[in-house]
Amino acid sequence: LVEIGWSGPVRVAIGGWRYGEAQEDIRDLDPFGDPALTDAQGAYLVAEGTLYHAEDQPTVRAFARLGASDGDTTDFKGGWQAGLRVDRVFQGRPDSAFSIGFDQGFLSDKARANALDAGTQFGDAESGVEITYADTFGPITLQPDLQWIHNPGGDRDRDAIITAGLRVILTLR
């Protein structure tokens, strides 16, 4: 992983990554019929900054990310995410945070070809919306999360799904 960036009112970074060991290709086979081994690599661009900040008021930040990968070792060849995060949502709750994000993951040509071989015609992308809230109560932080996913896995024939989760963090000091 290599990243170079600039931090100021807006933080901007660009980076690249590559696995040290070859990974199994999701479609191509070697001469023996086993998954071919290939290098997994990608690049990304990140921007985030504060939109509003005032003492004793909620702070609003925005973020955006773009990413691309080889599309040979996973079903996705790239994607984007963008959203807002509000810190100190409630007065008297300094650790409260709310976030909403939007995302889209673009399916690789190989993933779409695999689906077609299996009799399913995938779309170009999976899209989603995520909302989450976090707050700390003594040594415990609770973070419920709700996601809506359209064309899950890129499958246009599947209904949209909703997932819910809860992250619990225990901080020992």
Image (spheres, rainbow, N blue to C red):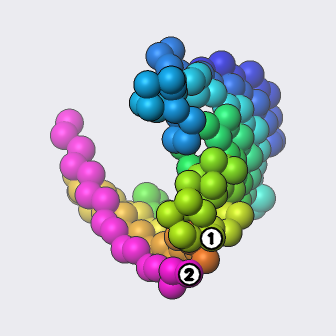
Q: Are marks 1 and 2 in contact (CB under 8 Å)?
A: yes
Magenta-tinted stretch: 157-173
Amino acid type of disc 2? Asp
Q: Earlier in the sequence, mark 1 or mark 2?
A: 1
Q: How many marks?
A: 2
Q: Is residue 160 magenta?
A: yes
What x and y, as percent, mark residue 6? Answer: 79, 28
Quadrant of residue 18 within the rendered picture: top right
Q: Quadrant of the N terminus?
A: top right
Please give the residue where the numbered disc 1 appears in the rendered image. Answer: 121
What x and y, as percent, mark residue 145? Answer: 41, 69
Q: Is residue 53 magenta?
A: no
Q: Is residue 31 visible?
A: yes
Q: Is residue 99 visible?
A: no
Please give the residue where the numbered disc 2 appears in the rendered image. Answer: 157
Amino acid type of disc 1? Gln
What x and y, as percent, mark residue 127? Answer: 63, 69
